[in-house]
Image: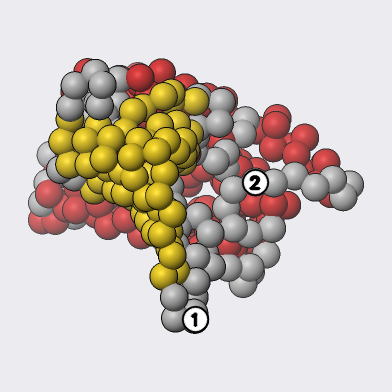
Amino acid sequence: MAAPRILWRFVFRDVAVYALIALAALTLLLVVQNVLRFIDELVSAGVSVDALLQLSAIILPSYVAYAIPSALLFGVLLSFGRMSTDGEIIAMRASGVSVPSLLPPVLALGLLATCATGYVVFEVEPESHRNMKLLLRQLQQSVRLIEPGEFRRLGSSTIYVHELGDEACPLQGVLISDARDARRTLYIAARCGTVHNVEAETAQLALALHDGSVHFSDPGAERYRRIRFDELETRLDLERYFRPRRKARDYRFAELLDLRTRLASGEKIKISGGIDPLTQVQLQIHRKLAFPIASIALALLAVPMGIRPVRAGRSWGALTAIGIVAAYWMAFGVAEIVISAELVPVVPAMWAPNLAVITLAIFLIRRSMHADS
């Protein structure tokens, strides 16, 4: 007996409600967890609470790509688990409704989730990364890069200011450790310092120092040198705060395809990441293609796992979903690691999690069909 459309509408609506609730909870959890990872650094740099909230809203799309497939998995497991616990699945089977007959509404939701996830990873996620960098640059005038009484790391240099002074000497007691030259570290001590400018284009902080000295020693040499100065101008690197390097995942899908063509033709293009640029681009292309398919793969797997004996209890669905989501995204993370280490080719590594989940889903669905017969 084929499942009537009214039953499909019921399953579609029930799964969608649970999935939307899970989507809201997962998105909030992921954003809060990841913001907390760097909140100390931003707060110590003087970023206001309003700016932090704005940053959280901008980086939200970066985590929606993970949340949508996971939320659909939760929705299917919780919905089918509730129907199983309440005896509705038993009633459906007694009426001749098989497990494959319940797949159309789940596949429809999976297709919608796939389209939404695809749009996020293809277009929205790279744009959010760019907007975040623009916001950081806009905040540069209000960020307290120099805090009296605290050591502050700026690029390869470290600066310490004893206290704030008046207009004639804004920064009193300035000490700078400059390690830009790996062969020789030098130290600058000055009685007074003034911030000349924060250069957005070069991401540098220009400082004018007065009445001080430069101290350095040559490696392996038994001598120490000091150079006194009345005035000295130096620059400190702010790239850590305002100009993060563009990574392969910061490009839109169309841009990645163009980069792949240019790199394959032999053009030299620098991309932050530490591995071969072509490998990085290939990795991100297949990552953006594989991520959306996760919605359908996980939804298919959740159907036979959600149909379970009544004695399993209502909490079984949530616990199972947590385990599957953790294992699935861990597999994706491991795939990116082994690709970055150039241990395995890009294509099999990135598509292995989806293939494994779809294979397991087909096996469980076939087994549930044999159980019905």
In the rendered view, would you say 339 is above or below 280? below
- In this rendering, the count of numbered labels is 2
User: Do the residues bearing badges 2 and 1 touch, measured as CB atoms within 8 Å?
Assistant: no
Q: Residue at x 70, y 30 (%)?
A: 254
Q: Is residue 1 visible?
A: no
Nearer the observer: mark 2 or 1; the answer is: 1
Q: Is residue 267 visible?
A: yes
Q: Residue at x 38, y 44 (%)?
A: 154
Rendered location of residue 115, percent (x, y): 53, 27
Dot 2: what SS? loop
Circle 2 is placed at which residue position? 271
Image quadrant for the C terminus?
bottom left
Q: At label 1, which amino acid type do we have?
A: Gly
Q: Is residue 348 left or right of residue 68?
A: right
Rendered location of residue 198, percent (x, y): 43, 25
Q: At label 2, which amino acid type do we have?
A: Ile
Q: Is residue 31 left or right of residue 58?
A: left
In the rendered view, would you say 32 is above or below 169? below
Circle 1 is placed at which residue position? 220
The part of the image, by quadrant, that contains residue 163 is: top left
Image quadrant for the N terminus?
top left
Q: Residue at x 58, y 62 (%)?
A: 340
Dot 1: what SS? loop
Residue in front for this viewpoint, 46 or 159: 159
Mark sitting earlier along the chain (2/1): 1
